[in-house]
């Protein structure tokens, strides 16, 4: 039978990410549990193990543990469940997967083949009884039962990107909830998935929240499902009794339609722009850069155009002081701070290196405080010890220098500040009493082929549609003019993240197949939002501002 693995609150646990990391680390150490019978064929005294996960659970682990950290936990190899895997019969395997019928079938087949010494099964969320019984029959019938050492429900079905940021990692969730063709079964399954993910968050925190939501609709249904899961779980009931005298967190569940402008409009802060204009996922940033001069010259001599180099960088505000300080700052401030800090670190590095080489001169004397005397050996030792820390800081700053440059290239090519300023004016009601001016300025920017790509212009028109600045006829006219301009003049800016900044289709006045598909998708989104607005299913921006 599956057993819950719910880490309760512990001393020193100050965040959801820390608690999730503790749960995953405990999961990885399950192969060497003292409760295992040393004489059992499924027990192992070896600290080494293999980690098998599916794509969803890989997303959970990635922000928590690096490859080197996994190795320190005894994981010598980590493989995808759906990949072709060779037998390693003398090493135990830790499976970390979603409890789906497909995954269970693959695990049963692995057990039948005895690919590994034993299998410790850990599911990201609850393994429902019908699936558990079907899996049990399958492993018994195929003769793989002896390979299974343990089965656990971990309840960590969410992705913690930062100490204060998590995601349920559900693709296309908004589309599913708002699809008029979705049946009752699909809607019920989607809400069960959301409630299950939130239950994992509550279970990992070990504290029962006060749940608040608007009455009616999907938020209330999710809240009721979550409340039932909390009530039915005995471990959390005991946790509730322990925490009745403590401060309980508040969980607010809202419909995304309450505020659609925020995720759609352009941004001006460092972290938001990284996510907007670069390929950013799971704390990893990817972008194209031009090859160095020597490479460009060598390729040109062979009569070819040098292709861009794809750069991949990891950024995590929990371990990166610069990113933590400046992720919410305006982009120009981040650029200025990066330059100043990098210059300061480089100067300090130069002083330390010159001092240790005995050629420090006045700078070294000033640093040691000896006034140019014989030097202080203890001060020199301190300087040498601080050098690795200084170099690590310099390395992180240089990473941000590359990212800032990539963001700047995209921002400048697409005129992102102009979109941001106009959208902000629309969202804050600046055109409340002058809808004609709003329409004129949106029309000019949306039809200018030298500014923005297809997505930029569609987002602008969507913000216009969500604001109170335009009526339905004006929105139709602006959208139609935008479409005609893009189809006849094209766009001078590449349509996708990582694509060339200048679109090859701009000279032909046409859109690529991908750009045309994105335009059609955007136009359908505008029509849908117009319908929601006419049925008063999304709040008017003026009403929201009055409420605030």
Image (cartoon, rainbow, N blue to C red):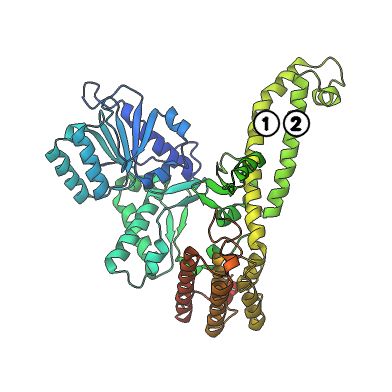
Calculate the distance from the C-alpha at mark 1 to the C-alpha at mark 2: 8 Å
Q: Quadrant of residue 397?
A: top right
The quadrant of the picture occupied by the N terminus is top left
Position of 7 compared to 37: left or right? Answer: right
Residue at the spot x=56%, y=57% of the render? 276
Q: Is residue 95 above or below residue 527?
A: above
User: Is residue 245 visible in this depiction of the protein?
Assistant: no
Q: Badge 2 is on which residue?
A: 348
Q: Quadrant of residue 373?
A: top right
Residue at the spot x=14%, y=35% of the render? 143
Q: Residues within 10 Å of mark 2 (few under 14, many from 20)?
A: some
The residue nearer to you, when weighing 1 against 292, is 292
Position of 219 compared to 94: left or right? Answer: right
User: Is residue 38 visible in this depiction of the protein?
Assistant: yes
Residue 268 position, x and y percent, is 64, 59
Q: Quadrant of residue 189?
A: bottom left
The residue nearer to you, when weighing 97 against 79, is 79
Position of 341 compared to 375: left or right? Answer: left
- Mark 1–mark 2 CB contact (< 8 Å): yes
Q: Badge 1 is on which residue?
A: 390
Q: Residues within 10 Å of mark 1 (few under 14, many from 20)?
A: some
Residue farthest to the left, as pictured = 141
Q: Is residue 191 above or below residue 203?
A: below
Name the element at disc 2. helix
The quadrant of the picture occupied by the C terminus is bottom right
Residue at the spot x=46%, y=37% of the render? 65
Residue at the spot x=37%, y=35% of the render? 78
Q: Which disc is residue 243 wearing? A: none
Residue 79 position, x and y percent, is 35, 37
Residue 380 position, x and y percent, is 74, 19
The residue nearer to you, when weighing 426 against 249, is 426
């Amino acid at each position: 039978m599956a057993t819950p693995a719910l880490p309760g609150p512990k001393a020193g646990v100050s965040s959801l990410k820390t608690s999730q990391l503790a749960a995953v680390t405990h999961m990885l150490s399950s192969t060497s549990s003292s409760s295992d019978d040393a004489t059992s064929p499924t027990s192992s005294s070896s600290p080494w193990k293999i980690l098998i996960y599916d794509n969803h659970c890989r997303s959970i682990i990635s922000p928590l543990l690096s490859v080197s950290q996994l190795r320190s936990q005894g994981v010598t190899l980590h493989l995808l469940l759906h990949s072709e895997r060779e037998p390693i019969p003398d090493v135990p395997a830790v499976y970390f997967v979603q409890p789906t019928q497909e995954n269970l079938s693959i695990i049963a087949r692995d057990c039948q083949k005895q690919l590994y010494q034993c299998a410790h099964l850990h599911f990201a969320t609850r393994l429902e009884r019908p699936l558990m019984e079907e899996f049990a029959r399958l492993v018994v019938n195929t003769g793989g039962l002896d390979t299974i050492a343990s089965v656990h429900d971990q309840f960590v079905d969410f992705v913690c990107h930062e100490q204060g940021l998590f995601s349920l990692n559900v693709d296309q969730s908004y589309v599913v909830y708002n699809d008029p063709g979705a049946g009752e079964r699909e809607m019920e399954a989607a809400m069960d998935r959301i409630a299950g993910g939130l239950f994992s968050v509550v279970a990992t925190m070990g504290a029962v929240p006060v749940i608040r939501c608007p009455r009616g609709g999907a938020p209330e249904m999710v809240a009721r499902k979550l409340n039932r899961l909390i009530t039915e779980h005995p471990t959390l009931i005991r946790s509730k009794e322990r925490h009745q005298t403590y401060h309980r967190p508040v969980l607010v569940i809202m419909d995304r339609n309450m505020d659609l402008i925020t995720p759609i409009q352009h941004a001006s802060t460092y972290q938001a722009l990284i996510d907007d204009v670069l390929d950013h996922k799971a704390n990893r940033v990817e972008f194209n850069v031009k090859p160095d001069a020597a490479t460009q010259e060598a390729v040109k001599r062979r009569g070819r155009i040098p292709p861009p180099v794809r750069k991949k960088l990891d950024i995590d505000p929990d371990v990166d002081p610069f990113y933590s300080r400046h992720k919410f700052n305006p982009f120009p401030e981040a650029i200025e701070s990066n330059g100043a800090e990098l210059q300061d670190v480089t100067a300090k590095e130069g002083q330390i290196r010159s001092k240790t080489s005995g050629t420090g001169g006045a700078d070294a004397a000033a640093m040691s405080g000896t006034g140019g005397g014989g030097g202080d050996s203890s001060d020199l030792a301190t300087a040498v010890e601080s050098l690795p820390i200084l170099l690590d800081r310099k390395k992180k700053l240089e990473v941000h220098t590359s990212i800032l440059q990539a963001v700047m290239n995209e921002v400048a090519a697409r005129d992102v500040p102009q979109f941001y300023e106009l959208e902000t004016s629309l969202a804050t009601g600046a055109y409340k009493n002058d809808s004609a001016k709003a329409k004129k300025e949106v029309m000019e920017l949306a039809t200018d082929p030298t500014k923005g790509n297809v997505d930029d212009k569609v987002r602008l028109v969507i913000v216009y549609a969500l604001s109170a600045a335009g009526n339905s006829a004006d929105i139709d006219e602006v959208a139609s003019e935008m479409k005609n301009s893009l189809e006849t003049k094209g766009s001078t800016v590449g349509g996708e993240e990582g694509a060339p900044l200048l679109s090859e289709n701009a000279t032909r006045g046409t859109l690529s197949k991908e750009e045309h598909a994105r335009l059609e998708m955007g136009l359908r989104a505008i029509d849908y939002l117009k319908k929601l607005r006419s049925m008063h299913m999304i709040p008017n921006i003026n009403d929201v501002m009055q409420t605030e």
